Image (cartoon, grey):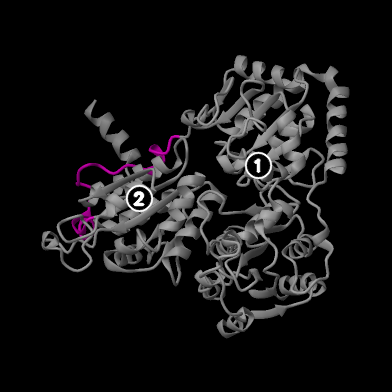
């Protein structure tokens, strides 16, 4: 029996055939997780992590110029790959400069791991010495801050504990509602050694990362499908959970089999191509009137991977969603999210891809006689788009100068194809694109619609290009967000990540200025030539002041294979208020 246990232990132990530094052992765990990149900047005790990465053949450090860029890149890596994006920085700057990516990951459910330190200066931490982050008198508290911006955080005080803690934060990051987790190193952990004889024993990481199937019962699937197929006016609401589950094919196929229109939340935009016959665009405050119309008249709602936030539901107005007159079916991987904002008639708990697949199988097997009804539903969707309007407005065809933002979106749409991924920033530039940009492929738009921070688009584009090097990546931002992370242009050159950046430059914080109305203060500034700044970095830079020049400039930028900044002079007379949905406007009035 003793011999058998010993053999089992040897099979499950990691390759600790000798003594390793803590960070060498940490690197082994990252390799076992098949992590490709670590995003960050050496500093404090975390510089030792880079020594651990030095000999790695599979984990590559990406050096950035600001922790905000690194944290967002890690969040996007997690969002796109399903593996935790790893961000590292010294304690003080992980909880300040690097907090933005964690916030977006927390609210958008992207798997992410933050590796940071206390800079504890042991044994002097109790004296509040320089940069101490243990929470001792006179020092800040890294863990307390991390508690507020992650779903799980732990502190490692010893080498073996550090290795197992990384395995546990990885497990937490990937479990249920995915999200950011943090491992904080005490100097005793960083400076220690991990040995085969150490305790607790170190085992292969794969043993910790248990991925449940997340399927529903056949009975519950049957009930849900019967409700949808027998409904008068069913509708599907697709949220960010479809992105997380990569359930694009399943969403589209179920829509086609049921004939139901598909509307999305802002964060769910591009879960279905908005050129698809069943697509009716984004719902809610910034959505399409045709989407809100279908939703308000629907009798059965299938909600897939959405918490139904206030901006998605026009502040929970019963004119849009009303549990007393509508049957609500909600698919979510996290039981806590079901019946959170609205009571639902039937929760389906599990992975969206799996449950949609189950529903597809049931519908195919049981509703062949409903094909005429399905085709009639799809025909009605097309009629409603023509009658109510769909992602079109007069301003999109205006030749006015400065260029109207609606026309900018139209020119961008004319250039992008199914191989292009668009990343957005916060501010008015985002809502113009959320409302008007007709996405042409599933998963082709990335937006900071969870936390909504400025300076997001360029880091998001860089990480996207890392994950999908063969695809074209277009970053759209405003002149408020661009300066926040324009240092990312350096990263694009240093790692050969050619992206195209389009700036809507109206010399104002548009959302702020237009909210101030006739009491404008601290929201406008002089015109800056960002194309010249880009050229000084070594990128291509173009300034555009005529609408007809924009599409050719974008095409040329992609053809160049070099990072290009296109500075577009846009009007500051247009307002986000103009593009709010009719329902949102009526409720605001």
Q: Is residue 185 above or below residue 173?
A: below
Q: Position of residue 304 (x, y in %)?
A: 62, 33
Answer with the quarter of the image where residue 141 lies.
bottom left
Q: Nearer the viewer, mark 2 or mark 1?
A: 1
Q: Residue at x 48, y 45 (%)?
A: 107
Extreme front residue here?
518
Quadrant for residue 463, please give it: bottom right
Q: Main secondary structure of the magenta part?
A: loop
When the figure is inspected, residue 530 is found, relative to residue 513, above or below; the finding is below
Question: Circle 2 sits on which residue?
Answer: 182
Chain part drawn in magenta: 186-210
| Magenta-drawn stretch contains 560 | no
Kindly identify the residue that appears in the image at 34 percent across and 64 percent down: 93
Is residue 46 visible in this depiction of the protein? yes
* Badge count: 2
The answer to whether residue 90 is seen in the rendering is no
**290 or 148, which is in the foreground?**
290
Residue 426, x across and y down, in percent: 57, 59
Circle 2: element type: strand
Percent from the top left, x then y, of residue 38? 43, 60
- Residue 482: x and y in percent read 56, 70
Tell me: 19 left or right of 379.
left
Give the residue number, with chain letter if any, for mark 1: 284
Residue at horizontal 74 percent and vertical 65 percent from the top:
408
Compare residues 582 and 279 and report the one nearer the observer.
582
Question: What is the C-alpha distance between the residues marked 2 and 1?
Answer: 34 Å
Q: Secondary structure at mark 1?
A: loop
Quadrant where the image shows the N terminus? top left
Mark 1 nearby-residue class (10 Å; few <14, some 14–19, many ≥20): many
Q: How many C-alpha atoms fall within 10 Å of the one at disc 2: few (<14), some, or many (≥20)?
A: many
Report if residue 198 lies within the magenta region.
yes
């Amino acid at each position: 029996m003793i011999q058998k246990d010993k053999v089992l232990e040897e099979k499950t132990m990691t390759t600790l055939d000798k003594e390793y530094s803590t960070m060498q052992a940490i690197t082994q765990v990252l390799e076992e997780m098949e992590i490709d990149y670590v995003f960050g900047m050496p500093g404090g005790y975390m510089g030792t992590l880079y020594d651990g990465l030095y000999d790695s053949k599979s984990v590559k450090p990406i050096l950035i110029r600001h922790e905000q860029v690194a944290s967002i890149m890690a969040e996007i890596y997690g969002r796109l790959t399903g593996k935790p994006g790893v961000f590292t920085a010294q304690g003080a700057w992980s909880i300040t400069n690097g907090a933005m990516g964690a916030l977006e990951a927390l609210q958008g459910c992207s798997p992410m791991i933050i590796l940071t330190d206390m800079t504890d200066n042991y044994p002097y931490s109790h004296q509040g010495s320089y940069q101490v982050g243990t929470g001792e008198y006179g020092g800040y508290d890294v863990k307390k801050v991390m508690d507020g911006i992650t779903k799980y955080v732990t502190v490692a005080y010893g080498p073996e504990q550090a290795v197992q803690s990384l395995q546990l934060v990885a497990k937490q990051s990937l479990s249920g509602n995915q999200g950011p987790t943090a491992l904080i190193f005490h100097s005793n952990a960083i400076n220690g050694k991990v040995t085969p004889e150490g305790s607790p024993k170190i085992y292969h990481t794969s043993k910790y990362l248990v991925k449940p199937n997340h399927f529903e019962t056949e009975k519950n699937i049957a009930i849900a499908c019967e409700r949808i197929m027998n409904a008068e006016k069913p509708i599907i609401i697709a949220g960010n959970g479809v992105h997380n589950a990569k359930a694009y094919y399943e969403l589209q196929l179920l829509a086609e089999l049921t004939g139901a229109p598909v509307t999305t939340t802002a964060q769910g935009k591009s879960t279905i191509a908005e050129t698809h016959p069943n697509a009716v665009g984004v719902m809610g405050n910034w959505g399409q009137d045709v989407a809100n119309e279908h939703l308000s008249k629907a009798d059965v709602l299938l909600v897939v991977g959405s918490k139904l936030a206030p901006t998605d539901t026009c502040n929970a107005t019963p004119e849009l969603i009303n549990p007393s007159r509508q049957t609500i079916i909600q698919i979510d991987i996290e039981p806590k999210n079901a019946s959170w904002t609205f009571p639902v008639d039937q929760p389906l708990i599990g992975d969206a891809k799996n449950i949609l697949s189950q529903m597809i199988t049931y519908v195919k097997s049981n509703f062949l006689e409903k094909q005429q009804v399905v085709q009639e539903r799809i025909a009605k969707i097309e009629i409603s788009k023509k009658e109510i309007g769909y992602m079109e407005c007069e301003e999109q065809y205006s030749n006015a100068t400065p260029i109207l933002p609606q026309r900018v979106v139209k020119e961008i749409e004319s250039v992008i194809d199914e191989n292009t991924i668009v990343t957005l920033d916060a501010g008015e530039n985002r809502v113009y694109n959320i409302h008007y940009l007709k996405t042409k492929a599933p998963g082709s738009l990335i937006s900071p619609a969870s936390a909504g921070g400025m300076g997001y688009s360029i880091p998001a584009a860089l990480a996207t290009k890392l994950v999908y090097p063969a695809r074209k990546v277009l970053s759209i931002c405003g002149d408020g967000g661009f300066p926040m992370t324009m240092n990312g242009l350096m990263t694009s050159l240093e790692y050969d990540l050619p992206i195209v950046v389009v700036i809507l430059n109206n010399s104002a914080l548009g959302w702020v200025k237009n909210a101030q109305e006739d009491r404008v203060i601290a929201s406008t500034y002089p015109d800056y030539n960002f194309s010249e700044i880009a050229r000084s970095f070594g990128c291509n830079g173009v300034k555009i002041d005529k609408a007809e020049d924009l599409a050719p400039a974008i095409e040329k930028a992609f053809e160049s294979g070099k990072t290009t900044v296109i500075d577009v002079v846009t009007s500051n007379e247009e307002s986000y208020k103009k593009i709010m949905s009719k329902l949102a406007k009526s409720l605001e009035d």
